[in-house]
Amino acid sequence: MNTQESRTAWIVAGVLLVLLIIVGWLWLAQKQDLGTVLQDGKSDIASVRDRMSKDCQGPEADADACAEDKQDLSDILDDFKADLMESSTTVTASSSAQ
């Protein structure tokens, strides 16, 4: 393989890498609809609440685990609020466009 072919191969590989990164970013940045956000949020909140009821109450209560569960719930609620606002804004914008 000569130098020109090698250089062409590296250019093609670089272009493919850039395209792969762009597609991956678009896939991750895809907005969710309101129904999906609500279902995912409900599931996440329910799982943390189940853990909290075990870690914060009863004979097996663990104060450190309870505090960690409360922080997890707070973080999930913050994320849920942001996702909900984004999906509501998206739905509102697309609804008004129709």
Image (spheres, helix red, strand yellow):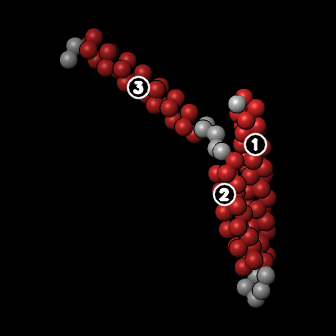
Q: Left or right: where does residue 81 sit relative to residue 33? A: right
Which quarter of the figure is the N terminus placed in?
A: top left
- Asked whether the beta carbons under mark 1 and mark 2 sit within 8 Å of each other, the answer is no
Image depth: mark 1 or mark 3 in front: 1
Looking at the picture, how far across and down is residue 31, in whole percent? 64, 39
Q: Which residue is mark 2?
A: 39
Q: Is tag 1's residue or tag 2's residue first in the polypeptide sequence?
A: 2
Q: Secondary structure at mark 2?
A: helix
Which one is nearer the viewer's eye here, 37 or 59? 37
- Asked whether the beta carbons under mark 1 and mark 3 sit within 8 Å of each other, the answer is no
Q: Is tag 3's residue or tag 2's residue first in the polypeptide sequence?
A: 3
* Quarter assignment of residue 32: top right
Which quarter of the figure is the C terminus placed in?
A: top right
Q: CA distance from mark 1 to mark 3?
A: 35 Å
Residue at the spot x=31%, y=20% of the render?
9
Crowd tier of the residue under label 3, counting other residues whose Cα lies within 10 Å: few below 14, some 14–19, many 20 or above: few
Q: Amino acid at mark 1?
A: Ser
Q: Amino acid at mark 3?
A: Leu
Q: Which residue is mark 3?
A: 16
Crowd tier of the residue under label 1, counting other residues whose Cα lies within 10 Å: few below 14, some 14–19, many 20 or above: some
Question: Can residue 32 be seen in this snapshot?
Answer: yes
Q: Secondary structure at mark 3?
A: helix
Looking at the picture, how far across and down is residue 80, in whole percent? 74, 52
Q: Amino acid at mark 2?
A: Gln
Q: Secondary structure at mark 1?
A: helix
Q: CA distance from mark 1 to mark 2?
A: 14 Å
Question: Can residue 65 be seen in this snapshot?
Answer: no
Check the image and report above or below for 56 versus 41.
Answer: below
Looking at the picture, how far across and down is residue 6, in whole percent? 28, 17
Q: Which residue is mark 1?
A: 88
